[in-house]
Amino acid sequence: MPQSLRRCCDGSLDYRLKLLALLICALAVFFLLNTGYSALNTISRLEVVEAERDQWQRPAEVVRALHIRPGDVVVDLGCGSGYFALKLSSPAGKGGRVLAEDIRRLPLTFLWFRTILKNERNISIVHGGATDPHLARQQVNEVLIANTYHELTDSQAILAQVRQSLVSGGRLVVLDRSPNPADIGATRLAEHEISAEQAESELRQAQFEIVSRQDDFIEKDPDNESWWLIVARKP
C-alpha cells in the first residue's frame, strides 16, 4: 500500500475512533444528567411526603424518647430513605454518629444523596443483612426501629444483635402499627402490623427491660391506623 494511502487510512481510523469516544462521552454525560435529574425529582417528592408525615407521626416525641446526648452513637435500623435518620443528626451533634441501616440498597442510595444535599456529615450508611444489621459490639447508645419491626423475618436474631451493639443502659425505641381487625383478610395493611403485646414479649425474651409502653402513641394516621411505642433498655 502506498505510504500516502496508508496515512489517509490511518487518519480516517483516528477520526472514527475520536468520533466514537466523543459519542460515548456524550451518552455518559446524558445518562448522568438524566440519573441526577430523576434522583433530585424523587428526593423532592420525598420531601413533600415527609412534610405530610410530620403532621401525624410525632417525630419530635419519638426522638425525645431516645434520650440522645451530644456525642452519642444512634442507630436508625430500617432507615429507608432517611426520614428519622436525618432528624437524629442534630441531637447526636458533630461529635456523634448516626448509623442509618437498611437491607435495601436503593433507599440507602437516596439517603446518601440527601446527606450530601443537606450537608449532614455525621450520618453513616450501613447496608445490613436480614438477620445481622452489622453493628459493632457495645458501641451504640440508642437504637430506633420505626415502622420496621413488623418486617423482621427473625426478630430474635436482630434483637440479639441490637443488644450486643448497645452499651450498658443503652435505649431501644420501637414504633409500629397496631393490628386493625378491619384489615385482616381485607387489605394489605395487615401484613404491616404487629401488636404491642407481641413486640413487648419478644423484647423481654431478648432480655431487654421495658421502660415504658404507649399503646395509642398515634391514635389515627392517614390510613386510620393506630401506632404504639415501646421504650426498652439494655440492663
Image: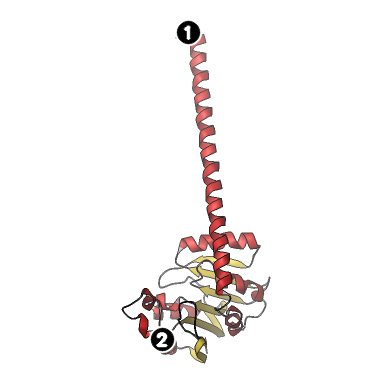
Q: Residue at x 52, y 50 (%)?
A: 35
Disc with the residue nearer the chain's start (2 vs 1): 1
Secondary structure of the residue carrying tag 2 is loop
Expressed as whole percent of the image width and height from the top left, the position of residue 95 reads 68, 72
Q: How many marks are shown on the rendered structure?
A: 2
Q: Is residue 72 above or below residue 232?
A: above
> Where does label 2 land, which residue?
195
Residue 2, numbered circle: 1
Secondary structure of the residue carrying tag 1 is loop
Image quadrant where one finds the N terminus: top left
Q: Nearest the camera: 11 or 139?
A: 11
Q: Residue at x 63, y 77 (%)?
A: 72
Expressed as whole percent of the image width and height from the top left, the position of residue 10 reads 50, 18
Expressed as whole percent of the image width and height from the top left, the position of residue 115 reads 61, 63
Amino acid on which the number 1 mark rests in the picture: Pro
Q: Is residue 120 above or below residue 158?
A: above
Residue 136 visible, this orientation: no
For residue 180, which quarter of the picture? bottom left
Residue furthest to the left in view is 185
- Label 2 to label 1: alpha-carbon separation: 86 Å
Q: Nearest the camera: 175 or 66?
A: 175
Amino acid on which the number 2 mark rests in the picture: Ser
Residue 8 visible, this orientation: yes
